[in-house]
């Protein structure tokens, strides 16, 4: 079998693609399913897309994408199935989708992980019309199967397609094993620090020539403590520039909280929101250091507005946090209520008071953070990991 993936962005660049299907590409080959991939934007065009200015280069990137889609039509006969992620083109009607389905009679598996048929409130009337979002319903209608990231999205797709499969966003928990090692390091530091304190106490009461000989291989507490944990607790958020506005609702709570507690707020994104906080830090998102950067967070947050657009979110931030043992606090919107089990994997907060109280609780209690983090890791392994959904992904290509 040979299949073709069609997505907006180049491989290994966009989180949506990396955590929806790219994790399974090796699995396909292991099951004798060969694949090809084509993005709308080229590598070069992708780099220009979110840069400041360069309108001409951005126009060329879009024009080049349409040209690639046209040339693609000459190669479609080689594939048994076509997997379309989100959309084939960023603008215009679903002409290519129609041609693939009706002219070439190909089986389309359509995948999406946001309520992309809706306006998120940031598009002008002209841009909304130009994006032609009614094509989401059309693509669902012409598809053999649809895979959706949560129940809200799946229910929308079921209006148009008979075979809709709920398929959550996943992480490769093997990559995130380092977080467990970090926990072990922290436990070792606690043990060694305790031993050193006991050794110091004994030496004070019963002086001996060399106390280090009593407990060999124990260094100073400062040298044993993991670097990421030798500072104040870190509350963190990760995301893209398009979701930074969610932090606006959290900022007043953080400003009030920092009057009473000592903590740092860390943002990992592709744009710095420059928040006015006493202890604020920004790390530019980097695929190569993504896991290590996330490990600096002690408490993850995912604030959302309670609206229809937010119900389409697939909880990716929470999945990332919990996968490396970070407890999280989230708005009780959409799939967040499935991932966050209050008091077990984190807390849900629907008001300023609840955000304040839950943040206070986790900032002050490292043992609670550790326990919730371990529970969260288990949940991700069972329901949101590559290993747990590998067989289900392969079954997408089977006749039913």
Image (cartoon, rainbow, N blue to C red):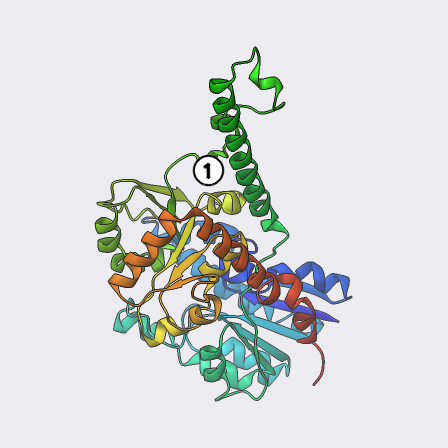
The residue depicted at 45 percent of the width and 55 percent of the height is 327
Residue 68, percent from left and from top:
54, 63
Instruction: Tell which of 212 and 357 is nearer to you.
Output: 212
State left or right for residue 197 relative to residue 361. Answer: right
Local SS, label 1: helix
The residue located at (40%, 81%) in the rendering is 134
Q: Nearer the viewer, residue 123 or 268?
A: 268
Give x and y (percent) for residue 206: 52, 17
Using the image, determine if residue 158 lies above or below residue 28.
below
Q: In screen coordinates, is 111 left or right of 335?
A: right
- Compared to residue 102, the image places residue 43 above or below, namely above
Left or right: 174, with 125 as reference point: right
Number of marks in the image? 1
Asked if residue 306 can be seen in this view, the reply is yes
Q: Nearer the viewer, residue 71 or 378?
A: 378
Q: Which quadrant, please, contains the N terminus?
A: bottom right
At a point 43% along the width and 78% down the height, the residue shown is: 93
Q: Name, please, the residue furthest toward the top.
A: 209
The quadrant of the picture occupied by the C terminus is: bottom right
Q: Quadrant of residue 4?
A: bottom right
Residue, disc 1: 228
Residue 94 seen from this side: no
| Label 1 crowd bin: few (<14), some (14–19), many (20+), radius 10 Å | some
Against 215, residue 172 (above or below) is below
Is 6 displayed left or right of 396 in the figure? left
- Residue 366 percent coordinates (x, y): 43, 47
State the residue in front, 89 or 116. 116
Q: Position of residue 115 (x, y in %)?
A: 41, 74
């Amino acid at each position: 079998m040979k299949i073709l993936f069609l997505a907006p962005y180049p491989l290994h660049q966009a989180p949506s693609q990396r955590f929806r299907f790219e994790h399974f590409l090796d699995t396909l080959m292991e099951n004798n399913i060969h694949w090809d991939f084509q993005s709308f934007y080229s590598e070069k065009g992708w780099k220009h897309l979110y840069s400041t200015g360069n309108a001409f280069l951005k126009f060329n990137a879009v024009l080049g994408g349409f040209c690639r889609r046209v040339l693609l039509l000459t190669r479609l006969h080689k594939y048994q199935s076509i997997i379309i992620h989100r959309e084939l083109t960023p603008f215009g009607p679903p002409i290519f989708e129609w041609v693939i389905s009706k002219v070439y009679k190909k089986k389309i598996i359509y995948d999406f992980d946001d309520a992309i048929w809706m306006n998120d409130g940031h598009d002008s009337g002209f841009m909304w019309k130009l994006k032609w979002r009614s094509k989401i319903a059309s693509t669902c209608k012409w598809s053999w199967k649809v895979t959706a990231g949560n129940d809200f999205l799946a229910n929308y797709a079921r209006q148009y397609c008979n075979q809709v499969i709920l398929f959550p966003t996943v992480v490769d928990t093997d990559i995130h094993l380092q977080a467990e090692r970090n926990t072990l390091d922290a436990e070792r530091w606690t043990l060694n620090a305790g031993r050193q304190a006991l050794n110091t106490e004994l030496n004070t009461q019963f002086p001996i020539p060399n106390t280090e000989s009593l407990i060999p291989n124990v260094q100073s507490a400062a040298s044993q403590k993991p670097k990421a944990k030798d500072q104040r607790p870190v509350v963190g958020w990760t995301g893209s520039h398009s979701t930074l506005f969610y932090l606006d609702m959290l900022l007043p709570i953080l400003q009030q909280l920092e009057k009473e507690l000592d903590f740092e707020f860390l943002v990992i994104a592709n744009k710095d929101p420059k928040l006015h906080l006493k202890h604020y830090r920004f790390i530019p998102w980097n695929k190569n250091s993504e896991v290590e950067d996330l490990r600096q967070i002690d408490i993850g947050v995912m604030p959302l507005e309670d609206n229809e657009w937010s119900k389409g979110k697939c909880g990716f931030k929470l999945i990332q946090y919990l996968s490396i043992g970070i407890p999280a606090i989230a708005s009780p919107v959409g799939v967040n209520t499935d991932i966050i089990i209050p008091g077990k994997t984190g807390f849900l907060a629907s008001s300023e008071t609840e955000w304040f109280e839950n943040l206070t609780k986790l900032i002050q209690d490292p043992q609670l953070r550790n326990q919730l983090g371990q529970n969260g890791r288990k949940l991700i392994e069972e329901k949101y990991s590559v290993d747990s959904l590998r067989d289900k992904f392969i079954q997408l290509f089977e006749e039913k």
